[in-house]
Image: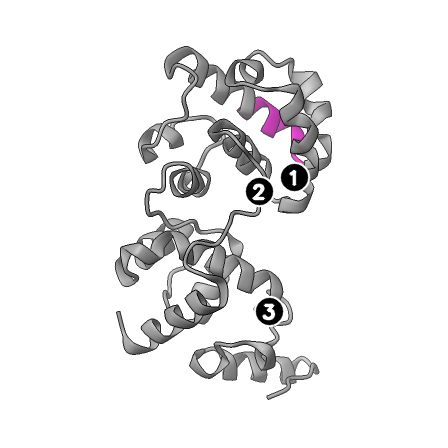
Amino acid sequence: MTKKTAAIIDRLNNEYGLIPEPTLDYEKPHELLVATMLSAQCTDERVNMVTKDLFRKYRSVKDFAEADLRTLEKDIHSVGFYHSKAVHIIEAFRLLHEHCNDEVPSSIEELTSLPGVGRKTANVIRTHVFHIPSVVVDTHVKRISGRLGFTKETDPVKIEFDLMKKLPEEQWSAINLQLITLGRTICTARKPRCSECFLSDLCPSRAKIATTALIKGGTFLS
């Protein structure tokens, strides 16, 4: 790990803590699996609104496995892409009920074998349920890890392995929510607020962002 990377990590840890809390509401492992599947292209706030009632109605893996598709679609309608999400949830939970004794598995291979579960969702489960160091690459992590110079890759899987190679293992799980929080509050996609960022003096993309803003007729405060 380079000195600059180490300095960035220290500031992230000081600002957000080493173990930030997940922003999806859940109590049981299977509930986090459902919530994460629902969160694709949807805000965590919206998902939490939906799962508040959803987890009262469907209390177990068996309940989701035996859910009626049309009814579940109505229950999750507001999260978007509700048809495919409902299909995947029912199919995935049937497998958990029939072959996994209603238990959510911990291995990346078993998790990604479930319908609708990619590496991002699998790593969320591994991080928060099983406390296995894992890197979750969402749009914020993808964007900011590039801006900070952690990676030059654009493919999420390649970014995941790049971050695992360049960052210490004890930082893998923490970096997820740290960069997500930074991306939601300061280092946004359309208009990053570099003047407010506690990493601005260490960020290799700051000058490029400023130049881009001026070219587009925007403003940039140093």
The quarter of the picture where the N terminus appears is: bottom left
Mark 1 lies on a secondary structure that is helix
Q: Amino acid at mark 1?
A: Asn
Q: Which residue matches tag 3?
A: 186
The residue stretch that appears in magenta: 80-88
Measure the alpha-carbon separation of dots 2 and 3.
20 Å
**Depth-wise, is mark 2 or mark 3 nearer the camera?**
2
> Which secondary structure lies at badge 2?
loop
Q: Which residue is mark 1?
A: 48
Q: Is residue 43 left or right of residue 100?
A: right
Q: Can you identify the residue that label 2 sits on?
A: 24
Residue 61 point in image, percent of width and height = 51, 18
Q: Magenta segment: does it hold 85?
A: yes
Mark drawn on residue 29: none
Q: Quadrant of residue 211?
A: bottom right
- Looking at numbered disc 2 in the image, what kind of residue is underneath it? Leu
Relative to 64, is 103 on the left or the right?
A: left
Q: Position of residue 80 (x, y in %)?
A: 68, 37
- The residue nearer to you, when weighing 141 against 131, is 131
Q: Position of residue 86 (x, y in %)?
A: 61, 25
Is residue 175 shown above or below 96?
below
Instruction: Examine the residues drawn in magenta and state their main secondary structure.
Output: helix
Q: Earlier in the sequence, mark 2 or mark 3?
A: 2
Depth check: give the residue in front, 208 or 107.
Answer: 107
Badges 2 and 1: C-beta atoms under 8 Å apart? yes
Figure check: 56 above or below 221: above
Give the mark nearer the N terminus: 2 vs 1: 2
Quadrant housing the C terminus? bottom right
- Going from N to C along the chain, the mark reached first, 1 or 3, is 1
